[in-house]
Image: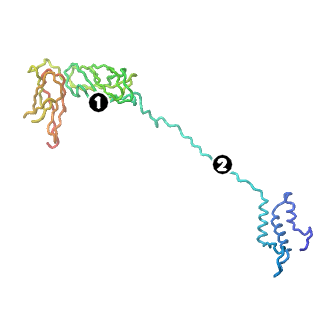
Amino acid sequence: MGSAGRGSWPSCMTSTMSFRNGRPRHCLLLACAAALLILTACSPSKVVGAFPTNRDLTPTLSVDAVYTAAIQTFSAQLPLTAPTDTPSPTLSVTLPPPSAASNPNPNPPGQGACDNATYLSDVTIPDGTLIAAGAKFTKTWLIQNTGACSWSTSYKLSFDSGDQMGGADVSLASPVPAGQQVAISVNLVAPTAPGTYKGTWRMHNQVGQAFGDFPYVEISVGAAPTACHRAAKTTVTISGHAGPENTTIDYGIGTTVTDANGDYSFTVPVGWSGTVTPWKAKVHPWTFNPQHKSYTNLTCDLPHEDYKATPPPGV
């Protein structure tokens, strides 16, 4: 190949020679491509039919290969910058503290799982028992300790509301473990005026907190008799009016029925206590007011023990 003088090099080559002095690099690619083309043009041609020599084994570069090599050379000189991770923002949520309303106290004083009392039954003096004016009587309830704590002898049954009828607080005679039953009695005195009286009582713990059910006593007080009358020596007679004919009067130890005028009468032993209940027709029953009457320790005849009967609809 022919030689060329230094002064014939393109100006971009001169700029490339001074690359390290800070001049632009854009001529580097063109310079490398031109050099490779010149070298390719100066290579001897192959002789057709001749034996191959070492010079014939030199590959001939295409123009595309020259450009590819130039680009790879240029890319190798570019500085590599490591990617920088951008930190993701962190979401922070602050929850408000739970309010008092979201967790109400499930066990208010005196009403929690520790102390609880459940009324089971009346042992004496059923509701509506007729008591003589000014007479003394004893009301007894059966109560169960349905709490988790044992009741000590510091626990007591105290008057809560209504008619106290002379009753006083009653402390337990002995401890009552959880789940056990106890009969508690209160000594009372019937009022002197006729009427219906009701008094409500309730259990209290050792610090005076009330808890549990509200057992009550309800009695009827009749006019005080001027003199006790008893026709027989060993029996007393209860009589009155109970509505239509053939109304059944059930007094516990026996039954009777009303006559054509709706009147009834029966005798029981002196000192008898019990309940009298009128009824008529089981399929379409009548209603009576009062529904029943209870008595305790009868010693005198009782007339005018009446009931008001109301027939069922359509009768």
- The residue indicated by pointer 2 is 87
Q: Nearer the viewer, residue 57 or 119?
A: 57
In the rendered image, which quarter contains the C terminus? top left
Q: Position of residue 207 (x, y in %)?
A: 40, 22
Q: Position of residue 8 (x, y in %)?
A: 90, 69
- Left or right: residue 93 compared with residue 207: right
Given contact means CB atoms under 8 Å apart, are the residues at marks 1 and 2 in contact?
no
Residue appearing at x 39%, y 22% in the figure: 206
In the rendered image, which quarter contains the N terminus? bottom right
Q: Position of residue 271 (x, y in %)?
A: 16, 21
When the figure is inspected, residue 31 is found, relative to residue 96, above or below; the finding is below
Question: Can you tell which quarter of the image residue 42 is in?
Answer: bottom right
Q: Amino acid at mark 1?
A: Leu
Residue appearing at x 54%, y 40% in the figure: 95
- Left or right: residue 31 compared with residue 219: right
- The residue indicated by pointer 1 is 120
Question: Can you tell which quarter of the image residue 19 is in?
Answer: bottom right
**Numbered disc 2: secondary structure:** loop
- Left or right: residue 114 compared with residue 270: right
Q: Nearer the viewer, residue 227 or 167?
A: 167
